[in-house]
Image: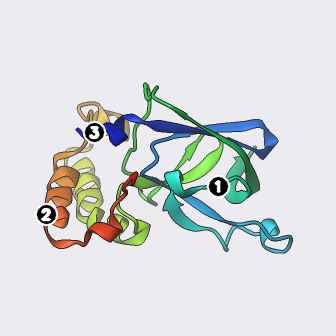
Amino acid sequence: MNDTHDYFVNRTYALNRTCRLFPGHLIYAGNHTAAAHLHTTHLQPVFAGQLQTGSDVIVNTSGNVGCATVVRMRWSRDYSGVYAPITERGTIVVDDVIVSCYAEFSSHVTAHACLSPLRYAYYVSRWLFEQSAADADAHLDGVHWYATLLRRLAETFVPQQFWWSAA
């Protein structure tokens, strides 16, 4: 494993939020402007390692979605308890910050589309075998074989500029 994969970043945002992410994880961010700060539509997925102090991110405060500004950043090697589940919409909430489920590849939309067969197979298998979501997920740990296969194929055909690099 490349040593850069061992580093996670703690990002401290306005409103006293700290969000722990791998630098290659996608997070919705944009430049701060007074008008844009009122809306989340100007924010696009970027690698967490590319965030800068002053960037806007999407936050969820008691069910209300809005923007907060990155006020401080620091690096840490502690990545215990950090994972990226595959979700229906391709987003998750990490420490009240809304982020993409995807990492290392620069396009959230492409990653989400490529994993759609896996999501559909999951729904069909739950329907066929009448499983609850908790029962269907109980055996999964680590990176799903389908995601691993897609990454191996994509590394062969997709240019390096689309992948996270600490350099």
Quadrant containing the N terminus is: top left
Q: CA distance from mark 2 to mark 1?
A: 32 Å
Give the numbered dot on residue 52: 1
Residue shown at 26% from the left, 36% from the top: 142
| Quarter of image, res 158 | bottom left
Q: Where is residue 107 shown, x and y percent of the image?
A: 40, 69
Mark 3 / mark 1, whichever is N-terminal: 1
Q: Is residue 23 above or below residue 66?
A: above
**Viewer-nearest of labels 3 and 1?**
1
Mark 2 lies on residue: 153
Q: Where is residue 146 shown, x and y percent of the image?
A: 18, 53
Mark 2 / mark 1, whichever is N-terminal: 1
Q: Is residue 110 above or below residue 2?
A: below
Residue shown at 67% from the left, 56% from the top: 58
Front residue of this view, candidates 22 and 28: 22
**Residue type of the residue flagged with mark 2:** Leu
**Residue type of the residue flagged with mark 3:** Ala
Outermost residue to the right: 34
**Residue type of the residue flagged with mark 1:** Gln
Disc 1: CA contacts within 10 A as few (<14), some (14-19) or many (>=20)? some
Residue shown at 66% from the left, 36% from the top: 18
Mark 3 lies on residue: 136
Q: Is residue 51 left or right of residue 153?
A: right
Q: Are marks 3 and 1 in contact (CB under 8 Å)?
A: no
Residue 149 visible within the image: yes
